[in-house]
Structure formats: C-alpha cells, structure tokens
Amino acid sequence: MDELTSLACEKIFFDEDTARGACAYSRAISVLNPIADAMHVVQGPLECVTCATYAWNARGSISSQPMLHGKQDKIFFDNLGLSAQVMQDLAAACKPQAIFVYSTCMTETMGCDISEVCESAAKDLRIPVIPVGSMGFQAETGYEAACNALLRLIGSRSYKPISPYSVNILGDYNIAGDLWPIRSYFEELGIEVISTITGDSRVAEIQRAHCADLNLVQCSSSIGSLARRLEEKYGIPCRSVSFLGIEETSSALRTAAEFFENPGIIEESERMIARETKRIRRKIEHYRAKFAGKRAAIFLNGASKAASLIRASNELGIEVVIVGIRDGNWVDRQRIRNYIGRDAVDANKLNPGDLGELLSKENVDLIIPGAEDQPVIRKLNIPICDICHNRTSTFEGFDGMVNFAREIDIAINNRIEKPPARKKKTRGRPPCMAQKRGRSGLL
C-alpha cells in the first residue's frame, strides 16, 4: 500500500487476476439454465449436491411462459451410474425439449463417460440429449462447454425469418426481465429477434439461431466464443454491445441499424433514441443533483460490463475512481482505462485490508460489486448498489436507467448507519458502586 498511496493520481485501476472464481460446472449451468423448456441433469455422487445448490438458478433469470427452468427437482444425482432408462423416466415426468447432462469434477474422478448414454437416450427420446463437459475449476472451461453444447443445438431447425432484417441477442440472461424492453425496441425498428441466448429462450429458437443476419453480443466473457464460432461456421458477423445506460443503449441500437444500411431503419432509430433520451434524462435529473460529487468503485468479473457501468454512472453524475475486474480482453480493458483516465495504475493482489485502505483514500461513497465480492465488501460499511443476478429491478434499456438511479439513491441517501458499538463492561465492581463507596469513605 505504501507504493500506492504515494502515487499522485486521481484514477486507479484495480486488477485481480488471481482472485477466486466459480468452477466450470457453475459457469456452464449459469449459461444454459435460463433455457425455459430444457431439463438439466447432473451426473455425480451425492457430494455434488452442494455444488449444484450453489450454482442452480444463480442468474435469477425469468421467463415469459411456463417453464422447466428454475425448478430444483430437475437436477438428478446418481450414485450408481447414469442410464438411458433414467433419462426416459425424467423426460416422461418433465416433457423437456432438450436435456443437458453435466459431468463434474467428481464424474471425472470416477471415470464416468456420459457421451454414450446421451447418444442412446437421444435416439430413444427423439430430442437432443447433450453432454456438457464441465469438469475442473477454470471458469473459462465452463463457458466453453456451454458454448459447445449450444452449437450442437444451433442449425438443427430450418426457419425463414419474417423480416429481411434479423438479429440474435447473445449473452443476455433476462435478469428481472431486462430483455423484454430490448426486444420491443427492435420490433419497433422492424428488426426481428430470431433468438435470445439464453435469457427467456426456447430450444426451438436456439436451433434456428443460424438464420439471423447479425449477432449482438452483450456478455463477451461468457458467450464470446459462441459468437466467433457462429461467424466461422455460418458467416454471421457479430458486434459487441451493451444495453446498460442511455449512451450504451443508444449505441447498440445505432450499431444494429447502421449494419443493415437501411435509411428508414436508421432514421427511425435516431427518432427513438432522441425521444427516449429526452424522456429519461428528465426523469433522472433530480437524481443527478443528489449525486453531485459522489465517487464510486466497481468490482466485477467482466470488463465489458464494468465499462458499461462506468458510462452509466457518469451519466448520473457519479465519478468512478476504482475498477476491479477478473475477466476481459485487451479491448475491454482499454475501454476502462480510457473512461477512468490514462494515469491508471494496476494494483494486483490487494488483500481486504489494503482494499479498505484504498477505498478510504479515494473517498469512495458507493461500491458496485459482483456476487463473489459482496461478502468482503459488505463488511466495509460503504453503501453498495446490488446489480447481481438476484435483483428484481430491470437495469437495461432506457427505463432501466431510472431504476439504476433509484437503487443508487436508496443505497447512498437512505442508508441505515450501524449502531455504535457497546462499551465493554468493566471487570470488578460496577462503576456506580465504586463511586458510591468512594463518597462514603469506605475505600
């Protein structure tokens, strides 16, 4: 910390390359679990129950129709071995359109091979039964396994788009219903959304994703591999976008409109952006007055999401002074550096004590943490805005910006201070008795 505190810089970039992260299985199921009409089977001994309980429904995704997604009883643990009959029994009870079978680190240790069972079950059930090789403790392995599973679905159903202009939205998990206003924007512009991967998605929609003209990638860390491989296999170009904040949402809509090179769509998108920007800025103006001079820190896994949060915070008049990330490519990291200043400093491997000192030094008024950092950060007695996967307010799109401002206002301006610590009792006689005896001359 001495080296850090001696640096005369206003912006600090905090990188946590060796920070703790989730295992491959938890990452894989967090990507695939939002598919509403799929069933998820975990092959492994009872020791895997804890892992599955931690990872199940971690994203807090919701669906617009009745679904299998989110029902805990769709996880199956088998001590004796997975069989095609087990699959048939589960399918008969749940009527899924596809089954994902996860192998875990325990499965690997036991030497189990689920591929043959999945292949046999798929022939009997006549639905996709897809093995997901999610062994180990590297998060990237889990994301890659999920992308591989999705690729086995994509391209297996023919479809003719209704509109001559169509997109897939990748890497959005419909937290609290984030995707629904986004879909309505594209519908208003005359752009068809072929599939959303994987928030509020169905197996049939994913199977026809290869028919889209453009992939819009929201979370590059979890789904970037899929976008690249769709471009290689089907020639579908991809663009990185974000729908978090006014500027980012506007930029995403412009990106899609300009890609199709249709003057009518471009003109309509500009009208929508102007209309919504004026409306939302009027709604958040009083929040900007409350946030004047406030400083924030952001700690997340993904660099792309962190960059979007910097811009959204700045739109509210909040200066972001510290950013901590675990994942992200060079482009995402450079965006962060540009947003918080070129005099950024890498502060690697800070322990909680150093982190608290750094936050105090930078006079941070608000922290926007990821789920994995919350247990430590909540102990620092600094207000936080919870943007994680269990939230109930939509943060994406134009109206999401109003919800984001409201949540920050609640965190900063309506916080409940901790009560003062009680003084420890004095050993020996109570002070009042000592004083009383002193006055009577007994001591």
Image: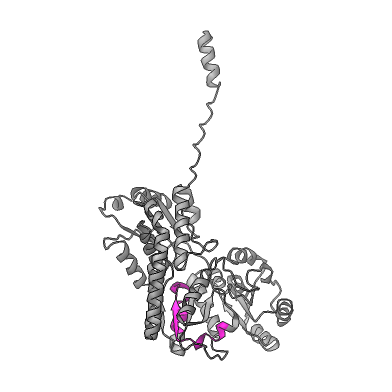
**Prevailing SS of the magenta stretch:** helix
Residue 404 drawn at (x, y percent): 46, 60
Q: Is residue 182 left or right of residue 79?
A: left
Residue 275 drawn at (x, y percent): 40, 70
As drawn, 370 above or below 270: above
User: Which residue occupies the extreme left position in the image?
Assistant: 8
Q: Residue at x 52, y 73 (%)?
A: 142
Q: Residue at x 37, y 82 (%)?
A: 258
Residue 28 drawn at (x, y percent): 54, 73
User: Which residue occupies the extreme top position in the image?
Assistant: 441
Q: Is residue 166 left or right of residue 60?
A: left
Region in magenta = 205-229
Residue 57 or 253: which is nearer the viewer?
Answer: 253
Give the total number of marks visible in the rendering: 0
The answer to which image quadrant residue 282 occupies is bottom left
Residue 413 or 391: which is nearer the viewer?
Answer: 413
Colouring scheme, one of rainbow, by chain, secondary structure, one colour = one colour
Residue 382: in sight, yes or no? no
As drawn, 425 above or below 360: above
Is residue 224 located in the magenta-colored stretch of the structure? yes
Is residue 136 located in the magenta-colored stretch of the structure? no
The answer to which image quadrant residue 127 occupies is bottom right
